[in-house]
Image (spheres, rainbow, N blue to C red):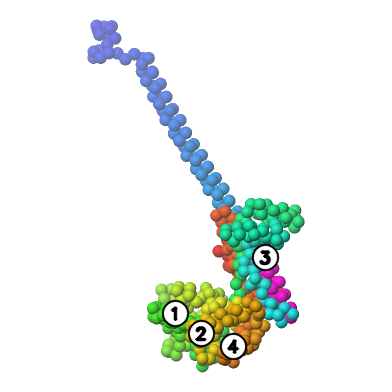
Amino acid sequence: MSTPFASKGFTRTGLPRRPASSARGRRRDDRRGIALIVVIGTIMFLTALVTDISFGARIRFLTATHERDEAKAYWLSVTGVNLYRLVLVANKQMGDNSMLAELGLGDSLWQTIPFINTGLLRMFISSDGDVEDEDLETFEQTGEVSEEVREESVEETTRFGSRNFLDFDGDFMAAVEGEECGININKLATRSADDRPEDTTTGKQLVGLMSGEENDQWLRDRSLERLDLIGNLADWVDADSVVASGKGGYEDDFYNSQPSPYLAKNAAFDTLAELRLVEGWQDEVFDRWGQQLTIYGNGKINITCADDTVMAGMLQAHLTPRPTDSEAAAIIALVRDYMATASFKSGSDFVKYLQDQGFSPDDELASEVGVKTQVFTITSTGTVGDATAQITAVVDFTSSSSGTIRYWRVD
């Protein structure tokens, strides 16, 4: 039996009856909401996936591009080394020419070409050696050449083959230094056990190098003794384990006390950077005198390329009476003036010049001075974009006309 409410669209409890079509619409709206969430979620996932793939591809592309540029920069730096080796081969041939040697020109080529770079090659090739003043001024100011010079150099170098010799990305810069222009500290390894390091020829030169009023004050400010520094060099390269300074004890006492202990080498230096391992020769001391030292060559100092500091050390070591700082500077000025118009042909020639000027060199000086360089350090840097590669190569022409690589480092 139906109630009055039922006939009027109300439930038995008195609440209005929900139409069947309204319930179905609600379920349909629910399904649409779920579908929308699924679609949005899918779009977000795909967006993240595509972004990740795109980012990864971009990173791989940039990495590959940088690796490509690094390879180009490396080979550009190799080009700089090889070009300088050609110059040094020609320098060796000039040195072997008796006529040029007699004139004192046997070791002059490398000193007249202190550096080679891309801009220099482009400028000379494009102009056939006749450089315009404007182009030279631009090159001196910026180290680069104009776009016009660059295009001309590319066109000119087609004569070398199907590929343009100077048509490449990037630049290189190469410079050379003569190793015999400094004091060879490996000679300390040959001293007699009875000789104090400072009494050897090399030791005297080191004392001279580190002497002078300015050096005296510099050493006092750091509580350093030059004889101790020289003795530590001798202890590193000599064959025994006894401290050379005469203070007694063992060479390894200092090195064993380090946070990472090591022993004195008791053998010749293999690289100049190894000097930083020697007691007292870290940081400031190395920075002050490291450039005037070498580990290569026959031990003779090439007077034609020795700098003023090395030359002053030689004069302090071998002249009697020992010159003061101002006297040494005056002698060096005389030597520089002479070499501007003439050349020393041998160590004996240099000694005779000093004697003619009224100075008294000792008997050792003639055998300690040379006028020829056989070992060179070439530093070549290649740059392409943000990539840079630097090669440091030591080339020895002592027994080879083409040069033997003694050291090769890539940074």
- The tag earlier along the polypeptide, 2 or 1, is 1
Tell me where residue 25 appears, x and y as whole percent: 38, 18
Asked whether disc 4 touches disc 1, contact meaning CB atoms under 8 Å apart, the reply is no
- The tag earlier along the polypeptide, 3 or 2, is 3
Asked whether disc 3 touches disc 2, contact meaning CB atoms under 8 Å apart, the reply is no
Callout 2 secondary element: helix
User: Looking at the image, which residue is at 27% across and 13% down?
Assistant: 16
- The tag earlier along the polypeptide, 3 or 4, is 3
Q: Which residues are magenta?
A: 83-98
Q: CA distance from mark 1 to mark 3?
A: 40 Å
Q: CA distance from mark 3 to mark 2?
A: 41 Å
Give 325 or 6, whichever is nearer the viewer. 325
Nearer to us of marks 4 and 1 is: 4
In the rendered structure, find residue 83 and report the number of the disc placed on it: 3
Q: Say what amino acid the circle numbered 4 marks.
A: Gln
Question: Dot 1 corresponds to which residue?
Answer: 214
Tell me where residue 219 appears, x and y as whole percent: 42, 80
Please tell me how crowded label 2 is: few (under 14), some (14-19), or many (20+) other residues with Cα within 10 Å.
some
Give 175 or 27, whichever is nearer the viewer. 175
Give 43 or 295, whichever is nearer the viewer. 295
Callout 4 secondary element: loop
Nearer to us of marks 3 and 2 is: 2
Identify the image quadrant of the C terminus: bottom right
Asked whether 89 falls inside the magenta stretch, the response is yes
In the rendered structure, find residue 357 and report the number of the disc placed on it: 4
